[in-house]
Image (cartoon, rainbow, N blue to C red):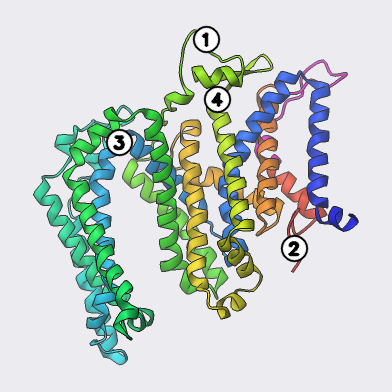
Amino acid sequence: MPQSLSRYRPLLISVAVVLAFFATLSATMEARIWVSILLSGLTLAALYFLLASGLSLIFGLMDVLNFAHGSLFMLGAYAGWTFYTNPRVIFNTAPLFLALFAGLGLARWTHLLADRLPRRGLGRWLGLAVVVLVAVALLTLGFQAFPLDRLVAFGTTVAGRQVATAEAQEPLTQGLTRLVLLFLAGGVLSLGVGSRDVRQASAGPTSATTPSTLRAVGLPAVLVGLSIVLLLVRDAGETLMLKGLPSDLRFLLALVVGAATGALVGGLIEVGLIRPLYARPIYQVLLTLGLLFVFDQSVKAVWGPAGAFMEIPAFFNTASDRCPSPDLIAWLSDHCNSIMVLGRPFPSYRLFIIVVGVLLLAGVALLLQRSRLGIIIRAGVQDADMVQALGINVRRVFTLVFALGAGIAGLGGVAAAPFVGVNPGLALGFQLPAFIAVVIGGMGSYAGAALGALIVGLARAFGDYLVLTGVQLPGMSQALKASPTVANASTVLIMALVLLIRPSGLFGKKD
């Protein structure tokens, strides 16, 4: 028992401090007020955790500090918002990238041609230069004069002139031509990714390679077919999305799109950029910092510098004479936009964000503790070389974990969009608190990330309350208020205090 208490001592101390803090609040203010602060803090904590959990997973397994993780949160928010409000962008851009990936999927066949190229000396570099030049030329032709600005100009949130769908979209023949060009570009690029693993997989007995051959043919064919179908049904698909689907179902699909966008971009970052730099941690930091600015400017170039708000789904935004709901049971039938909590209305969508955070916490914890993948991940954290020696592809596990963390961030971005809106400042606005939460909890600790997010969220909610209203302390004629600067710095002060007492964080382990 003493050993068990020692193991959970940081958690027990943190819980005791939080309980003491709210016990003090309950003695100086009304219950309905401090409960409202608590719920607001839990809402922020859930959003911070959706970022901090991915950061913790990635650092814990791969020792990669991803400073672009907030950008994945932002990209997920924009992808989900675009799918929810302007699906014509998805129907006209997704086919292009599917065609490009289909061409890249030809690597299992193009390596036969790549093997004929010189492998050493000047001939090798000349061959690679020709491949790059041809691929760049095809990509330039494929994306040349693409009407992205007209496709984005949709809905009431556009600052400039709105463009009708019929005017914004290209003719079908031109769209199909772009698909062909991008497919060819992907095929040319695949000449450079025909790896030794592909050549080895293609060698050997026919019976052993048949599944790989089927996969090599089937995946590009499926991607090409899907790209053509999306292009053919773009008008009907837009009508179905905006008028045929209820906002609740469209929002759920937007959550999936945001998570998939984050996972896809995260996986591509790990495979194409992070993987060659595992032995150079300083380069990783510089790379991810650079990606932060690249994604920021990319979002401004595509969607503009102005922000927008995503409509709250009807399931959490019904207005009627019975609103706000008197309790949670009544809300299950009337779906009001707020619920009475101790005589004070609280937005029901914020409760949904809290539930999402709790479900993700439990789901990832079960994945890590109860699944075979979780065992591999935890073993990889302890000794990646030993896991590799057991015949497990650690590189693939690294990519999967990076994509998982990025997907959670993308999901969090969509969940945050109806609460805080979408704007280019989302990346930095949420990344700094998430990093602080990870540092407080302990680098690489999933439980520490959850506890750190809780502490940061509660501190930020109480700091905002001090700025807006203040606290009436006994013996004082006026309420004690804080400046916005002090409120913003409160989380940094907590981090500094924790690191002074425990330099490795609450759940961190000493090297």
Closer to us: mark 4 or mark 3? 4
Closer to us: mark 1 or mark 3? 1
Closer to us: mark 4 or mark 2? 4
Looking at the rendered structure, the secondary structure element under dot 4 is helix
Q: Which residue is mark 1?
A: 322
Q: Residue furthest right?
A: 2
Q: Which residue is mark 3?
A: 86
Sequence-first tag of 1 and 4: 1
What residue range appears in magenta? 470-490
Above or below residue 425? Residue 6 is below
Q: CA distance from mark 4 to mark 2?
A: 39 Å
Q: CA distance from mark 4 to mark 3?
A: 25 Å
Q: Residues within 10 Å of mark 1 (few under 14, many from 20)?
A: few
Q: CA distance from mark 2 to mark 1?
A: 52 Å
Sequence-first tag of 1 and 3: 3
Horizontally, residue 304 falls left or right of residue 185, namely right
